[in-house]
Image (tube, helix red, strand yellow):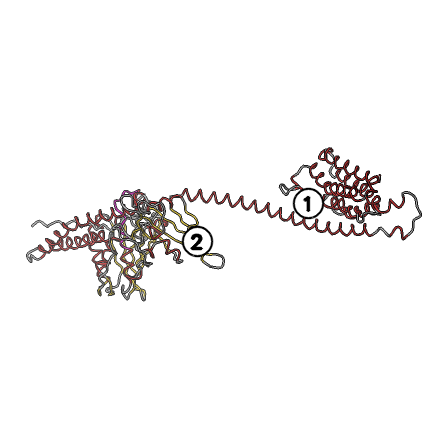
Amino acid sequence: MDRLLTVLSLDRISFHELSMRSRVLLSQMPLFVTTVVLVAGIWVVHEPLRGDLRVQLALALTVVLTVLCVLVPWDRLPDGAFLAVPVLDFVPITLLREGTQSTVTGVGIMAALPVIWFIGSGRLPRASAPLGFLLTLAMVWIPLLVPPRPLSAELLTAPLLIPFMLLGIGLTVQVLSNSMERQNAELEAKDAELRRLLAVTARRERLLDTVLDTVDVGVLAIDEHGHDVLMNRHQHRIHDLSLPEGMSDGAEAELRVFADADGTPLPVDRRPALRAIRGESFSDVLIWAGEPPVQRVLSVSARVLRDEDGRTEGSVLSFNDVTELVTALQAKDDFVAGVSHELRTPLTSIRGYTELLAMDGRLPGHVRSGLEVIERNADQLLVLVEDLLRTAGPGLELQPVEADLVQVVQQSVAAAGVRATGAGVDLRVDAPSRLVLPCDPVRLGQVLDNLLSNAIKYSPDGGPVTVRVVPAGATVQVQVADRGMGMRPEDAENVFGRFFRSRNARMSAIPGLGLGLAVVREIVQRHGGTVRCDSAPGEGTVFTLTLPAAGPAGAEDGDRAERDGSPAVLEPDRAVVGQHQDLAALDGPVLGQQEVPAAPQREEP
């Protein structure tokens, strides 16, 4: 019924969107049109029926009912009041059937129109078909009683085909209508849920766009074919920066991307987006985008996006602008290299003249001893200068030989003796008489000098400082223990970081740069060993070195960062991309400063 009415309304709007009056009128129109057409045909073809009162009354009643559909304010009446119209429609249908029964057949089938109206209204979901059957039965039986006539079973059963046929039609339409209503209810529920999900998705998309446009990092998402899926505002600026002059857009191969600051073009197959398309994941790959003076240095990372089955769906790349950081690192390297070169020149002269003075066989013993201390500390200071130079270049290099570790310990203790005496510190050595192992004695001496210098420096109230050498099977342990101010356990975990200074160190105003322990860790790791710090405030500090008894063979390659073949990668020990640290706020013991002992007082004759 709804479909028929929708057709009658030219399918421009939904039937349920019409007013109640319009819906009642459209529901009545099929019977009105059928009646008018039938009466017109009778008027033209069957001249004897023109004056039949029953036909005339049927047409008049149909017109009146149709007019009432227009005039009555159905929306103000109780719900379902409009069903009076299809009930009354059975009166003109009965008159037409009786008036044309001998001439026109099948007029009684018109009763299907009000029956379908009952069912389509939805007001009588279970009673509509039985009600239509009863009204149709009344339509065929009431005329048998007017005028009164003798009734028989044959007379009553002869017209029952029409009521039962309409009952079948009604039940069929009712089943179909109920099924359609359930489907419509399900579709409406799904439509409401879909609208809700679309609203949630739209909100999340707006939130994602806002977040991505807020962060100061370029973000690019691509599908498995390399097509751009998402690009935030910052990445748009990076993309525009990389375009050749005069171009408004370009493919990856056309972008001005370089492998270094010297303008070496980055091969197309090594560019971040193409590597991501191949399914590679990488971190902190440096590229130079654009050309001077607007060129920027970018740290690029990529992660592969996979579905629940593990298949690649694309990749997400981040482009972090590290131009200022790289510039600062380069300035730092240039500064360290320049200062170190300036320091190395006078140190070389000091060392040369001490060697010349030591060649004089007429020197008294205490003078020669003093020259040896000067020479040793000049060598140590020269090593520190070289270490500063290497912070801007490759890591520390070892020159391992068979050496007596105990002798190395005793030399460091002797060198620190004068300063320890001045600070009220009692230096002690607990070691076997001899312990030979492959190592770099100069580097290990530097380690011990740093640790002893720290132990003395952070023992302002004096006390013992003990150096222990303990063979432990395949390893050798060296401990430097003091009873000084100590530090918090959380500071002890970070004490080997560059420029790190503990809170106690800052509060006590003890000078230092925080490089010594970083050098200690690197030297020990180059030997294939480990270093640990155990400390507590007010209880002192213990540094434990664990060295392989077999020596540092192959150790230099063990801690080398694995490269992925990218043109440039920021190493964690060289730079921390995207992190801005206030170096003045870092804390931890400061090592790496070798004190030159005061020359012994010359005895007067």
Position in image of residue 190 (x %, y %): 60, 48
Position in image of residue 410 (x %, y %): 22, 58
Q: Is 516 a magenta residue?
A: yes
* Circle 2 residues within 10 Å: few <14, some 14–19, many ≥20: some
Q: Is residue 290 visible?
A: yes
Amino acid under disc 1: Asp
- Residue tagged 1: 2
- Residue 522: image quadrant is bottom left
> Residues in magenta?
507-520
- Residue tagged 2: 223
Q: Is residue 541 above or below residue 17?
A: below
User: Relative to the observer, which residue lies in front, 81 or 324?
Assistant: 81
Left-right relation of 381 to 584: left
User: Relative to the observer, which residue lies in front, 53 or 441?
Assistant: 53
Amino acid under disc 2: Asp
Q: Is 550 a magenta residue?
A: no
* Circle 1 residues within 10 Å: few <14, some 14–19, many ≥20: some
Q: Is residue 461 visible?
A: no
Looking at the rendered structure, the secondary structure element under dot 1 is helix
Position in image of residue 218 (x %, y %): 38, 46
- Residue 373: image quadrant is bottom left
Position in image of residue 573 (x %, y %): 31, 53
User: Relative to the observer, which residue lies in front, 112 or 511?
Assistant: 112
Q: Earlier in the sequence, mark 2 or mark 1?
A: 1
